[in-house]
Image: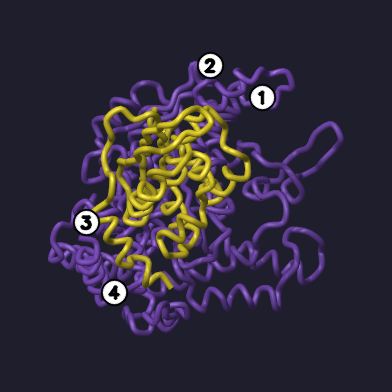
Chain colours: A yellow, B purple
Amino acid sequence: MNEDMYRENILDHYKKPHHRGKMALPSCSGHAINPFCGDDITFYLRMGGKKGVEKVEDASFEGQACAICTASASMLTDEVKGKNAAAARTIGKERVLALLGISPGPTRLKCALLPLKAFKLALYSHLGKMMGEKEKREIEEADEGTAAGQAAGEEAGK
Amino acid sequence: MAFDIGKIREDFPILSRRLNGKQVAYLDNAATTQKPSAVLDAMRNYYENRNANVHRGGNALAEEATEIYENARKRVARFIGAAASEIVFTRNATEALNIAARFCTGQLGAKCVLLTEMEHHSNIVNWQLALASCLQSPMGILHKQNASDIERSSMLKATQWQLAAKAAGARIGYVKMRSYGKLCNEDVEKKLSAQQGAFSFTHASNVLGAVNDADSLCRLAKKAGALSVVDGAQTAPHMKIDVHGMGCDFFAFSAHKMLGPTGVGVLYVKKELADKLEPVFGGGGAIESVALSGSTFAAAPQKFEPGTQDVAGAVGLSAAMDYLESAGMDAIEKHVSSLHKACLEGLKETGGVHVYGNGNRTGIVSFNVGRLHAHDISQIASDDGIMLRAGHHCAQPLMKAIGAIATVRASFYIYNTDEEANRLAASVKRAKKVLS
C-alpha cells in the first residue's frame, strides 16, 4: 500500500533538497504549518517582470518537515522557477502529486500539499490578490483540521 | 489463572490480520485497544436476546435489560473500588472530564483551577470552556447580530475563556513537570496554596507514560480545600484503581482503552457530591417529576444519565473488566512492564534513539530518532506492519515542555509480545537506513 512512499526520487529530494534556505532579498514569502506533525515550511520567491506579467525569478524554502513534505517543497521550487505568475498560479494538487509520483492517504496528503500552500500564500501576497475559493478548497481539502489545530497551537503557546 | 500470552492472543481476532503481507503488530494501545471475542459476544448477546429500554416501562424484557445495565454499573464500581451510585456512564473520558469541569466551575463554584503541564487537551480545553460558559461568556458576541467584524475576529483570536477570565478574575494555573514526566510536588503545594477551587491532573501522561502519585496529589488538594479531578484514561487499563483510597472527588476513564467498546466512558463522582449536584444535561429517565414550571431529579446516578444510554456499551465494558481481572491486573502490569523493558533495550541497541519519560507501568515508549521526523518513522513502521502513533498526541503544552514538536509513540498492552518489541527495533533500524 505505502511500500513505495519512500521511492528514490522522494528520498533524493529529501536528502539533498534543492533551493533550501532563505534567499537574499525575497520579494515575498509564505508560511504554512501542520501542527499535527510539526511540519513547518516557509516559501520564498523573488519576482520579476511588470505588474500584470510577473515572473518567478527565483524560489527557495526553509523549515522542518518530514520526508514527503521536504521532497514536495524541493520539487516545487524547481517547478515554479522561471514560470510566469499566471502559470504558477495554476499549479494544484494534481501537479504536486504527479511530481512526487505517489498517491498518499489523507494523513500524508497534508504533508505533500503543505509546501503548495506556503508557495501560494507567498505568490498571492506579492500579487496582492486573494486566493480563489476553489483553489483554496483544493489545498485546504488536505488541510481540514489544520485551522483548528493552529488555533489550539496558538492557545497552547500562550 | 496463569498468564498465557498464546491463549490471550487467540481471543483477539484482529491480531491475525495481515497488512502489506505482514502480520499486524498493534502498538498503539494508548490510543485505543483491540477487543476480545468475549466483549464482542457479550454485546451481540445483549442485542440479540436482551435488548429493551432501561429504567422505563414495566415489561419483563425492560426489567431484564435494566438489571443487566445496573449490573454493568456494579461491575465498573467494583473495578475501581467505588459504590454503584457513584458511577456515571458517559460517552468517553473526554465527556466525563467535561462534565466534571462543568460541575466544579458551575455548581461547586471553582473559579480558579489548577492543571498540569502534562495534560491531554481533553483536560485543558474542557476547563477553558467550562469557565467561559459560567462566567458571562463573551462567546455570545460571536452570535451577536450587530457585532463588528473587528469585534468578531478579535473574539475568535483570543480563546474565549481568557476573555471571560479577565472579566471575572478566574484563572487556570499549571503545575510544572519534571523532565522524566512526573509532577514537581513542591510546585503543586505552592500553587495549591493560592486558593484553587479545583485541581485536575492526569494519573499518567499519554505521551510520557509516567504515573503520578494520585493519592498524595488528592491529599494535597484536600488539604488546600480544592476539589480533585483525576484523568485515569491511561491508568485504569493498566493497574488496580481504588478511588476511595485515592480520595479523589472525580475520576474519569474510557472503555475503549481497556478492551471495551468505543462510545462508553465513566465518570466517578464521590457520593457526597453526587447526591447534591444537579445534572448538566436534562431529559427523560433522569427526572423524578416534570412540570411546566420546573423539574425534580431522580437520585444519583440516574439523574446524570438522561436519554437512552449505551446499554450494550456498558455490557461490553463490563465484559472487558471481567476479561482483565481474569487475566489479573497484577499479571498484566508485570507483562506490560517487561515489554516496556524489551522495547527500550531494542531501541537502545539501534542507536541514536532518544526516549522521553518512563512508561514502565503504562507500557508507553515515546521516542525520536536523531533528527528524523516522527511521521517518517511511523510510516516506515506501518509499512512493516507495526502500528504506532506519531505527532503531538493531543498534548501540545507537554510537547512544548519537553521541547519536541512530535514524537513516535509505541504503547504495549496485554496481547503484545517480545517479538513485536523486537520487530519495532528492527523497523526503526530500517527507517534509519532508508532515510539517511
Instruction: Give the left or right position of residue B146, taking residue B262 as reference.
Output: right
| SS state under label 3 | strand
Residue designated by label 4: B420
Rendering coords of residue B239 (x, y %)? 35, 60
Decide which of tag 1 and tag 3 comes sooner along the chain: 1
- Asked if the residues shown at circle 3 and circle 2 are in contact, with their CB atoms under 8 angstroms apart, the answer is no
Instruction: Give the left or right position of residue A72, taking residue B90 as reference.
Output: left
A98 lies above or below B42: above
Q: CA distance from mark 2 to mark 1?
A: 16 Å
Q: Nearer the viewer, mark 2 or mark 4?
A: 4
Q: Residue at x 27, y 44 (%)?
A: A20
Q: CA distance from mark 1 to mark 3?
A: 46 Å
Q: Chain of mark 2?
A: B
Give the residue type at disc 2.
Ala
Rendering coords of residue A100 (x, y %)? 40, 60
Q: Which numbered marker is on residue B140?
A: 1
Residue designated by label 3: B369
Q: CA distance from mark 3 to mark 2?
A: 46 Å
